[in-house]
Image: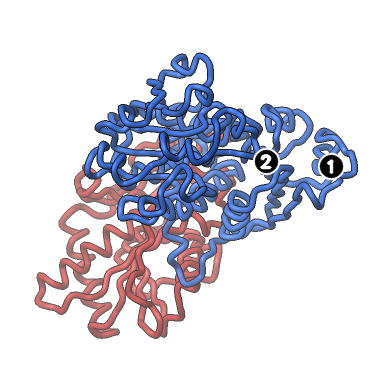
Chain colours: A blue, B red
Amino acid sequence: MKGPHAFAQKHLLGVEHLSAEELTTILDLGDRFLEIADRPIKKVPTLRGKTVINLFLEPSTRTRTSFEIAAKRLSADGINFTASASSTTKGETLIDTATNLDAMSPDIVVLRHSQAGSAQLLTKYIRAAVVNAGDGQHEHPTQALLDASTIRAHKGKIEGLTVVICGDIDHSRVARSNIFALRTLGARVRVAGPRSLLPLGVADLGVEAFDRIEPALEGADVVMMLRIQLERKAGGRFPNTREYSRYFGLNQRRLSLAKPDAIVMHPGPMNRGVEIDPSVADGPRSVILDQVARGVAIRMAVLYLLGGGNEAVE
Amino acid sequence: MNLRPAPPERNLVERSEILDAVAMARVLRRIAFEIVERNGHDTYFVGIHTGGALLAERMVKLLVEGGEKRPVLGAVDITLYRDDVFHGLPKPEIGPTDLKESIDDRVVVLIDDVLFTGRTVRAAMDVLADYGRPRAVQLAVLVDRGRRELPIQPDYVGVRVQTTAEQSVQVMFSELGEPDRVVVRERSGQ
């Protein structure tokens, strides 16, 4: 049964299985929620009395803060559990953490975890709606949604655009979620990076793979640079960051290969001077801070839908 | 997801016409001029999305055509402020809230198409409170169908009709692809 908001999911675990209609519902709502940030009182009473638990068992400041602000702007009560402060450091399993949280009757649990599939696992042990805020190398759905929202705002559409995702594709849940979302919405997706950082069978995801950045950039509408995740052992896949920067870093010269009105994106945090040159990151084509602003709005849309906004009557 | 009974707007037949296009235009013109007469040209017209917003736009246009100074026009969407936001009403799309010019110390006239329980107006007043502190808030409606559930009354009324709870009052707009008119509908067989 679908209401006027075509979104009938109880959880948001990934974007792989969402339809173009469902993705568009979230993007449209996100556009509406964006305006709340400009109000004198940046708050609406919609989720009053609902409890949102941010369970972040992997370090993340930006995504957690973004979800926290989103929950507060909807008047939900937000509680943060972070890895260092939680019982997981005392040896509690994710399932025990989940059943304990469930006993406190939250309405939505936002999970960040280093294991792929952890969000899916959580849904079996708690009654609350679960939002995947990044699970291992699997998915990071709200990042892909905020990226799609940013692209749509700057380009007016997504269908038919050529989007380049460059960097550590193999370790990147951001790349995976973006590939799924952008393909569903009708974009052509190219991925570029050293062969050692491109997953085997990447073409099966419906993308064009390049082991050099220059041909990938030609005629691109959107250039999305990924962070070199040194903490995920990506460092062992190429000689050093200086060489990576020389062959794959986005500088003005390389950016000139893309369309003149191409936009530059980065999910953050940036390694300035490694995957992206500061002159590009701070340049007129960079929409990186717009991504951050839209992140809050998209997360508000997701919390709104999962908090009850999807229960529209046909 | 909870399965709920279909909302009462379904399977309804038309019972009577309250206003046709000519009467609707006449009523709107009267209300628009009444508002300006009472409050002056500084009045802030704020339509409640969707029907009220269309009516507010028309009123402003009628005033300008009638040689009056163009009043400030705004709009509010109350979806996020409903007291029944998650309780089984068909959800409208979230519309734009546009109060770019400050409402502080202004006379704001909220405009809606149909006044029924008063809950929409209550929500709209909450939206206004988040944007500032108007000097006064007044209410103008095209149709007052009675059956209030809150202590809210209109300052300007196009037409009053007695209705039962099961009936539905619908305003049709040429902007939305139908000829202008207001009708009462009810379930067939009643």
Residue B55: name its quadrant. bottom left
Residue B187 visible, this angle: no
Residue at the (64%, 35%) spot, across then down: A232
Q: Which mark is residue A192?
A: none
Asked if both marks, 1 and 2, belong to the same chain, the answer given is yes
Residue at the (29%, 34%) spot, across then down: A220
Residue B139 visible, this angle: yes
On the picture, is A54 further left or further right than B120? Answer: right
Mark earlier in primary sequence (1, 2)? 1
Quadrant location, the N terminus of chain B: top right
* Residue B8 rendering spot, x and y as whole percentages: 48, 40
| Element assignment for label 1 | helix
* Residue A52 rendering spot, x and y as whole percentages: 68, 50
Quadrant location, the C terminus of chain B: top left
Q: Chain of mark 2?
A: A
Residue B46: name its quadrant. bottom left
On the picture, is A163 further left or further right than B147? Answer: left
Residue at the (76%, 50%) spot, across then down: A81
* Residue A282 rendering spot, x and y as whole percentages: 38, 56
Kind of residue at badge 2: Arg
Q: Chain of mark 1?
A: A
Dot 2, how many residues are within 10 Å of its Cα: few (below 14), some (14-19), or many (20+)?
Answer: many
List the residue tagged with mark 2: A112
* Residue A113 rendering spot, x and y as whole percentages: 70, 37
Dot 1, how many residues are within 10 Å of its Cα: few (below 14), some (14-19), or many (20+)?
Answer: some
List the residue tagged with mark 1: A88
| Element assignment for label 2 | strand
Residue B114: name its quadrant. bottom left
Kind of residue at badge 1: Thr
